[in-house]
């Protein structure tokens, strides 16, 4: 089911909420999923209130119990990301949640001949109390995403400086990889926010995840556990990331990074 109109090019809380709420009342879905984005979270909250139903935000995994009236079990972080809890909404419908980006891999549809229904756009702009006088600006992001990358290089505060962190981008370019990291490098201005891996960022599925100077807080670990192979480099032998890694290198991360960069340069 879809609606197409020029008024829907940019998210507007009143227009989107009214249109989708009408569709929910008509079709009565059991489950409604939203992306865990700024617009997705805002829209989900408004619709959950109108439907008088529950909402689980920033979900990391979903499980469906068909034998229990299609009960949806949502896994989400709690207590600053230190634990993962399971939440259900057994009494009200639709069951709603926002799903963290990269949680699920893209798969081709088994039935490409899906029936599509176009709904007529019928929102009256005269109902709006706020007049739209301009379009929002969007930050440009690279077309290649972390969730699609086969090789991901992750950097943490253990790299000590932006100069060292920039070397990860150079190494990634030489080995056809993508760069990601923890929250701290973003706060320090070493990398852009959209490259964050973990609860507040993306979940990745690479063949190889190579981490430099990352301690291994649960907020980051939940985003890398679906990697096929994890290699962690940290000079602290007690770093939490070693509990998750397949290969552990106890050494100075900037030194190892510099050595790899020299090797792949020539």
Image: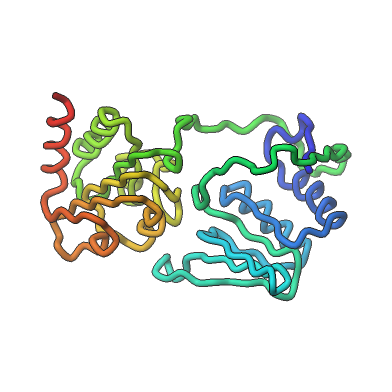
Q: In the figure, is residue 162 to the left or right of 112?
A: left
Q: In the figure, is residue 99 to the left or right of 228?
A: right
> Which residue is rendered at x = 58% and y = 60% of the image?
57
Which is nearer the eye, 252 or 116? 116
> Which residue is rendered at x = 29% and y = 28% of the image?
173
Which is nearer the eye, 18 or 77? 77
> Where does the image place residue 50, in percent across and percent down from the top left?
78, 61
Tell me how many marks there are: 0
Residue 161 location, quadrant: top left
> Where does the image place residue 24, in percent across and percent down from the top left?
81, 55
Quarter the N terminus occupies: top right
Q: In the figure, is residue 25 to the left or right of 227?
A: right
> Which residue is rendered at x = 83% and y = 40% of the image?
117
> In the rendered image of this protein, does residue 265 appear above or below residue 117?
above
> Where does the image place residue 134, in percent across and percent down from the top left?
67, 30
> In the rendered image of this protein, does residue 94 appear above or below residue 247?
below
């Amino acid at each position: 089911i879809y609606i197409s109109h020029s008024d829907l090019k940019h998210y507007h809380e009143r227009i989107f909420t009214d249109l989708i709420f009408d569709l929910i009342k008509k079709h009565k879905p059991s489950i409604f999923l939203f992306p865990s984005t700024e617009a997705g979270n805002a829209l989900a909250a408004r619709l959950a209130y109108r439907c008088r139903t529950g909402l689980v935000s920033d979900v990391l995994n979903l499980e469906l119990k068909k034998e229990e009236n299609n009960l949806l079990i949502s896994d989400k972080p709690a207590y600053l990301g230190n634990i993962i809890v399971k939440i259900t909404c057994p009494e009200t419908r639709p069951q709603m949640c926002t799903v963290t980006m990269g949680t699920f891999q893209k798969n081709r549809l088994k039935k490409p001949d899906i029936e599509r229904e176009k709904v007529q756009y019928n929102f009256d702009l005269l109902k709006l109390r706020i007049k739209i006088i301009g379009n929002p600006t969007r930050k440009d992001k690279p077309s290649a995403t972390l969730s699609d990358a086969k090789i991901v290089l992750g950097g943490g505060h253990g790299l000590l400086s932006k100069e060292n962190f920039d070397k990860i981008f150079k190494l990634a370019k030489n080995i056809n990889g993508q760069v990601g990291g923890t929250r701290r490098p973003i706060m320090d201005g070493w990398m852009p926010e959209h490259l964050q891996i973990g609860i507040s960022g993306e979940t990745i599925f690479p063949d190889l995840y190579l981490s430099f100077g990352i301690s291994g807080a649960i907020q980051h670990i939940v985003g890398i556990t679906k990697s096929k192979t994890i290699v962690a480099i940290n000079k602290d032998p007690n770093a939490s990331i070693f509990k998750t890694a397949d290969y552990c290198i106890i050494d100075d991360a900037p030194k190892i990074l510099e050595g790899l960069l020299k090797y792949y340069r020539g």
